[in-house]
C-alpha cells in the first residue's frame, strides 16, 4: 500500500513514487495532484495500480496519471503508460475496456511487413465501420417505450450482429461479466 510518506514532490502539482519503492518497478510512477486530490487518491487503490503499471515489460521513462485518477480494474483510470519494442506490451486495460468504451484488441497472424503497405486503407476501413464517440453511428432516440424495447437484452443481436455484418464468427451470447470494483478481489485485476 502506498502512503503519503512514499511520495516525492517534483513540482507544485507533480508527485513521484520512485522506482525503488518496490523491487519489481522498472520506472518511477508519477501523478498530478494537489493536497486535496492526494487525500482522495490515497483513499482507493489507484496509486497501487499505478505502481503495478510501472512493472510492465517494456515500460519506458515513467508511468503517469492525470489529476482525475481513480481506481480502475488493472490500470488506474487516468493512467498513461508507454511501452517500447521488443519487450513492450499492449494492454486494453489501459484504455478502459471495463465500461465497453469501444476498445477492441485484435490478434492476427498477418506479418507486420505484409500489412504495412495497407495501414492507411486499413485505418480508413476501421474508422468507417466501427462506431466511435458519443452515439457514434447510432439512430436518433425515439419514444421512451421503443427505447426500452430496443435496450432489452438481445434486442440488437448481441454477438451475432457483427457476424451478420461480416465482421467475425457467430457465437452464442454469454452473460456479461459482473461490473464494478468488486468484480475482482480488492478491485484489482492481475496484470499479465
Image (cartoon, rainbow, N blue to C red):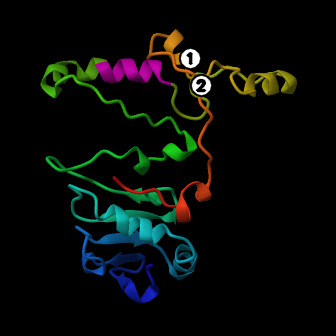
Across and down, in percent, residue 36 comes to 57, 79
Which is nearer the eye, 123 or 189?
189
Q: CB under 8 Å between callouts 1 and 2?
A: yes
Across and down, in percent, residue 30 comes to 35, 71
Q: Which residues are magenta?
A: 122-130
Across and down, in percent, residue 147 comes to 79, 25
What is the number of the mark on residue 173?
Answer: 2
User: Which residue has dot 1 on it?
Assistant: 160
What is the number of the mark on residue 47?
Answer: none
Which is nearer the eye, 100 or 11?
100
Q: CA distance from mark 1 to mark 2?
A: 8 Å
Residue in the image at 29% along x and 77% along y: 22
Q: Is residue 129 magenta?
A: yes
For this view, does 139 lie left or right of residue 76? right
Residue in the image at 17% along x and 50% along y: 87
Rendering quarter of residue 140: top right
Q: Residues within 10 Å of mark 2 (few under 14, many from 20)?
A: few
Amino acid at each position: 500500500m502506498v502512503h503519503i510518506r512514499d511520495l516525492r514532490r517534483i513540482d507544485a502539482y507533480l508527485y513521484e513514487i520512485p522506482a525503488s519503492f518496490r523491487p519489481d518497478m522498472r520506472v518511477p510512477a508519477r501523478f498530478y495532484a494537489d493536497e486535496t486530490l492526494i487525500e482522495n487518491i490515497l483513499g482507493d487503490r489507484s496509486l497501487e495500480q499505478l505502481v503495478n503499471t510501472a512493472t510492465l515489460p517494456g515500460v519506458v521513462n515513467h508511468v503517469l496519471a492525470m489529476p482525475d485518477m481513480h481506481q480502475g480494474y488493472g490500470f488506474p483510470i487516468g493512467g498513461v503508460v508507454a511501452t517500447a519494442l521488443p519487450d513492450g506490451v499492449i494492454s486494453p486495460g489501459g484504455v478502459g475496456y471495463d465500461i465497453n468504451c469501444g476498445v477492441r484488441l485484435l490478434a492476427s497472424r498477418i506479418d507486420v511487413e505484409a500489412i504495412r503497405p495497407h495501414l492507411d486503407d486499413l485505418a480508413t476501413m476501421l474508422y468507417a465501420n466501427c462506431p466511435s464517440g458519443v452515439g457514434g453511428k447510432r439512430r436518433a432516440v425515439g419514444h421512451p417505450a421503443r427505447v426500452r424495447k430496443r435496450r432489452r437484452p438481445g434486442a440488437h443481436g448481441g454477438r451475432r450482429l457483427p457476424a451478420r455484418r461480416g465482421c467475425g464468427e457467430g457465437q452464442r451470447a454469454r452473460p456479461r461479466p459482473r461490473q464494478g470494483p468488486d468484480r475482482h478481489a480488492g478491485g484489482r485485476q492481475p496484470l499479465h
